[in-house]
Structures are given as C-alpha cells and as structure tokens.
Amino acid sequence: MNTQNKESNASKSPKKKRGCLRFLLFFILFIFLGFSILLYIRYNAWFGNLPEEPYIVTSELDRITLTPGEDFMRERTISWRCDTTLHNAHVEYFKLDSTTNDTTFISISAIGKKVKSRAGEAFYYHAKLSDLEIGSAYGYRVISNDTSEWKSFVMPNSQDSLRFMFIGDIQDPIGRESNKLFNSIRDKAKQYDFIAFGGDQIERPMDKYWIIWYNSLVLWASQLPLIMAAGNHEYIKGLNKELDARWTAQHNYPPNGPYDFRGKSYFIDTPLMRMIVIDSNVIQWPIAVYQHMKWLKKTLKESTQPWKVVMFHHGVYSVREGRSNLLMNYLFLPILLKNGADLVLQGHDHAYSRITRKQDGDTIPPIFVISSASPKNYRNGFDAIHDRLGSNLSLYQDIKITKDELSYQSLFFNGEPYDDLIIQRKEDGSKQIIDNARHWEEQFLFDSFDKSEKGREKRKKYRDKAKERILRRFNK
C-alpha cells in the first residue's frame, strides 16, 4: 500500500511542478501586460517632453534674483542673466543711511557660468554678499557688460521675531492669474522677511515659462529673498529626470545639502528657525534616498533653533484622490516625526490639506500643509487623516515666529482666512497646537468633471463624499 502511494505521489509531483510553472508564467505575463498597458497610458505623463522653442538671450540684464545664504541674518546672493558671451561681472552695493547719506560703494566680483537648455544658452552670474548688518537697508546694482538700475533690500531688523510667506504651486501657463494674485499682495509682501515657494512655479522647463514667472515677480525677485523647492514641472522628464539647469543658476542656494544634490537640497539658518528644503524629485534611486534620509536626520538633530521647518514638493500624505507618494510616507515621515520637525510645507496636489497629530489629549506638531495658488486644480480625497481640506482654492500661508510661538494662517489673496493655528511652547519645553479653525466651514469647489454620463456620476460621488465629511465634522 505504501509503495502504491509513493508511486502515485511521484507521478503527481511533475504535474504539480508543471502546474506551478504555468501559473508563474501566466502571472509574469499578466504583470508584464498590465505594466505595458500602464506605460502606454502614462507614457506622456512620465516621459513626454514638449519641445522647447528656440530663444536668443540679449546683452540686457534680466532675472535679477535675491536669495539668502546659509546665515539668513548676514548673507545674500544676487543672481542674474546676461548675454551669450562671458563678461567681467560684479555687484556694487552700499548701506543706505538716511542720516549721513553715505554712498561708499563696495564691489564684489561675480562668477559667470554658461547654461545650456534644450533650445538656447546664456551666461548666468552670481555674487555673494556677506557680513551684512541686521536691520540695515542696502542699495545695489549688477554689472556685466550692461548695468542694471539700482535695487534695494532690507535685512531683518530683529532676532526675536520672523515672518514669512509660503505659496504652493503657481503653475500658471499664461501668467494672467498669477499676476493678479501677486499684485493683490504686493504691498503686503514688504511685511515679510522672505517668501517660500513649494515647487511647480512654472508650467514646463522652457524659457517662455521662465519669462512668465519673472514677469510676475518682477519687483519681488530682486528685493525680497526667495527660498524655493524644485517641483516636478521644473524637471525634464525621463527615466532619470533632470532639473532644468536654469533653476540652480537663477537661485544659487548654499551648498550644504547632500553631497550629490548641493544647491537643490539645502538649509537656511535664522536665530529662531532652521528651514530645511528638500528636492523630493530626486528621491527616486537608492543612493539619493539614502543620502537624503541621512542628511535630513542629521540636519534636524543638529539644529539648535526653537523651530524646525521643512519644505518639499511631494506630500507625505497626498490630498489628491488616488495619489500616494510612498517613499515620502514610509521613509521620510518617520524621520520628521522622530527628529522634531514643527511645520512641513508641501505642494504638488493642487488642493488644500492640513494635518496634525493627537497625543495624550493634546494636538501636537508637526503640522503638515499642502497648498496651491494655481489656476489648475485637482479633485481631493476625503481621508479622515486630513484635519482640514479644501479644493479649487488659491491660498497663501502667513507664518509668524517668536521664541515661544509659531502662528500659522492660510489666507485667500484678498486677506480672508481659511485656516488658523498656533503652536505654543509649554513651560516643560513640549509643544501643543491650538486649532482656531476646528469648526470653520470647508470649501469643496472642484467641478472639473466631464459632461458625459460618467462625468456626472463622478460629480455626484464627489459631492456625496463632501456632504459626508461635513456631517462627520459637524457631529464631532
């Protein structure tokens, strides 16, 4: 009997192996076909680049941009573009003093570099100004073959307070809406120490879109420091994406980031805050992931300032329906939570989200924010993890910092508030969040659905989910 069972099992074993092999082959074929279909559908989104129109740069100076050095209180870098020929370039500057009218010039040599894009080339210059004085105003002009008009900027007048503006995605292919938005807050901008941008400032990495961007920022860029994260729309698509060379040439941020990504990921120090900026687009290969994880942990740990703010483009918790940034969520979120980040500023999803955490009955940092000011908007999801949501809203964020308090407001460009929080430091050194907008109404204005029957069904489902969220929040 045992002999018969052994013979029977022996005869079944090859059949079983052949069956497993067939299943494995079918599974591999299924995965391959599925990936091929996905690649066909998403090829243009992942790899498609529109051709850049040829352009010629004249000998006139343009794109004058003011950015901070690592020491925000004492350093500024001035960058500009001029010509397709290298010139002997420099910056002349002086301290504005209304009592003595002292106009003694200081001349700083500039570094010039040829930058090639897909359809043109130009020389970009930058000069670093150091040992600037707190509270002082400076006049300057840039010189490289041509000479600019006199510009001016003001250094922060206090080490005890800091105020800055954050704006998420702009991505305005025409520039009409962004011009309106920037014009509406142009006078308010003078109240801020700097403006932070969360990426996707332009539609595509093309010179015609950089022209639109600088036309919108024609006054701000040369007078108010800009702290920027690169977005995916500043990248040339491909298996190995490449940041538009004009991005780094126009900004010249301090080279204190991960070794292979200097000028793209970096940090800026003020007495009250360390601001860490990550180019989340490059986190796609193991070496980039490893370098950034190690650097972020070290940079957060070594900060001695009362507040730590981190900014990058791709959200750790996406608010766009159906989107997930897995590497940011699984690998970088734990570092942010364990190493004391207080505020995390993000973009990419063209909707609004704010997330906090609960611990021992308190609401605690970090605050995770996704915001947008783009005429393009996406359908948001309704995951309960989002404390506050909104769609099709153009917003900017007003952040005020003292030693013991970080005040956060999200505002429409007419000044009306949409969100309001305060992080307070307790006597024992721990921090708690006061949510002033807990019971404020949320606005879900997304309505870019097809006019087909399928589109009408999607609209109904979206509105039903919005009603469910409103009822759920109201019942709380």
Image (cartoon, helix red, strand yellow):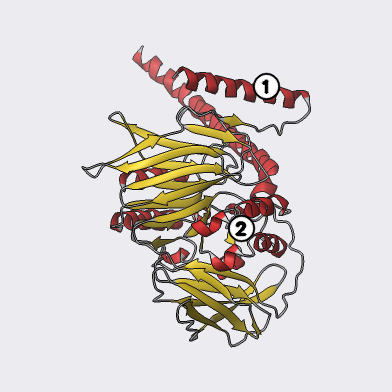
The residue positioned 48% from the left and 76% from the top of the image is 98
Q: Is residue 391 above or below residue 471?
A: below
Density class for disc 1 (Cα within 10 Å; few <14, some 14-19, many ≥20) is few
| Amino acid of disc 1 | Lys
Mark 1 touches mark 2? (CB < 8 Å): no
Which is more toward the observer, 37 or 460?
Answer: 460
> Quarter of the image holding residue 61?
bottom right
Distance from label 1 to label 2 (Cα)? 35 Å
Nearer-N-terminus badge (1/2):
2
Q: Position of residue 419 (x, y in %)?
A: 49, 37
- Is the C terminus in the top left, top right, bottom left or bottom right quadrant? top left
Which is more toward the observer, 301 or 426?
Answer: 426
Task: Name the residue at the front extreme.
Answer: 99
| Amino acid of disc 2 | Glu
The residue positioned 75% from the left and 70% from the top of the image is 55
Q: Which residue is mark 1?
A: 460
Q: Is residue 10 above or below residue 93?
A: above
Q: Which residue is mark 2?
A: 234
- Please indicate, yes or no, whether residue 194 appears anywhere in the rendered image: yes
Task: Name the residue at the right extreme.
Answer: 452
Density class for disc 2 (Cα within 10 Å; few <14, some 14-19, many ≥20) is many
